[in-house]
Image (cartoon, rainbow, N blue to C red):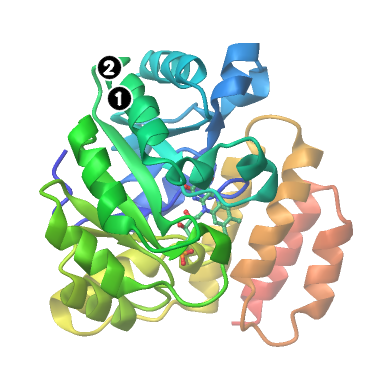
Amino acid sequence: MDLKGKIILAPIAGITDSPFRQICMEHGADVSYSELVSADGLMRGSKKTVKLMEFSEKERPYGIQIFGGTIEAMSAAAESASELHPDFIDINLGCSVPKIIKQGYGSALLKSLSHLKDIVTAVVSSTRLPVSAKIRIGFNSVRGVDIAKVLEKCGVSFIAVHGRLAVQQFTGEADWSEIKRIKESVSIPVIGNGDIKTPQQAKKLWEESKVDAIMIGRAAFGHPWIFSQIKSFIMTGSFEEVSLEERMDLLREHYQAACGRGNIKEKLREMRKHFHWYMKGVPYSKQYKERINRTEDLEEVMEIISKIKTRS
Ligand SMILES: Cc1cc2nc3c(=O)[nH]c(=O)nc-3n(C[C@H](O)[C@H](O)[C@H](O)COP(=O)(O)O)c2cc1C
């Protein structure tokens, strides 16, 4: 897979589901990942976990991200994920949620490079697909270069680096100088990630760090246009702002895609956070947000969106 110059949607548990991934791909994202998929959950045969891996052709190139801590579970997860024919299998080495770290999963695997090597080698030999890894720059001290070199030796095809330590969770700032050092020290492609909020920032960090590709997470919440805006800014030095009308049209599409399958009431509840994000910066939106938080009726949602749209 050629990653040079690509803008990639980050995996975000609870948010980057199939409808959202499709929307981002339609708006300029070049690669997408599943939300994190539990290797233990797959071993237990959890239907909810299996469902997390599903995707549509529009989301390709698409990677299934697995997390776990034993060779047995991670190898089995790589095998079962491969049966769905994604484009790559990604190993989560960045999750810093206490519940996951306590089990020795996610970023906790960065604590011991020999254990990391065993797990990653096992995953690489369990699938014919390319295997990638998404890492932090260390667990509690910076050792991104050592980690990246181990991964490269294990046969990982590319890495995405979130420029924070695991213990930082989401505090402080992403350290792009360490991302740059990692890029300079390995021959596999490196994707830079962390704190890119605007097209201007994307261009600056990309040029300074010389990474192969960049990954966008939170800046896409309620604003999937970020991908095409970054591309436009890099190519032409400018980008178009999005009108309220366009925002509401896409929000409507997003609701329709999300509510098209599964339990509608559940989907409407899940979509509330997206509604709030699409409304960011819209004046006098409190009343609409309150209604969205109460309603369990898709028609009412559509009515609210039309009302907001006619204000534009
Ligand atoms: C709510 C939330 C959930 C996340 N879930 C995942 C995940 O499932 N897998 C993963 O590798 N990273 C996950 N991340 C980390 C993001 O992929 C990304 O590395 C991080 O948000 C930094 O990028 P950003 O500043 O562009 O958002 C999550 C982040 C947030 C805020």
Q: Which of the 4 quarters of the picture holds residue 257?
A: top right
The percent coordinates of residue 240 (x first, y second) are: 33, 80
SS label for mark 1? helix
Residue 149 visible? The answer is yes
Q: Which residue is mark 1?
A: 121
Q: Amino acid at mark 1?
A: Thr
- Pick out the residue farthest to the bottom: 283
Q: Which of the 4 quarters of the picture holds residue 233?
A: bottom left
- Pick out the residue farthest to the left: 187
Looking at the picture, does residue 37 appear above or below residue 46? below
The percent coordinates of residue 262 (x first, y second) are: 69, 29
Q: Which residue is mark 2?
A: 125
Looking at the picture, does residue 155 appear above or below residue 251? above
SS label for mark 2? helix
Badge nearest the viewer, 1 or 2: 1
195 sits left or right of 2 in the view: right
The quarter of the image holding the N terminus is top left
Task: Please give the name of the residue rendered at 64% of the width and 82% of the height, measured from the top-left corner.
Answer: 282
Looking at the picture, does residue 225 appear above or below residue 98? below
The percent coordinates of residue 104 (x first, y second) are: 58, 37
Q: Amino acid at mark 2?
A: Ser
Task: Please give the name of the residue rendered at 52% of the width and 77% of the height, measured from the top-left corner.
Answer: 172
The percent coordinates of residue 159 (x first, y second) are: 28, 47
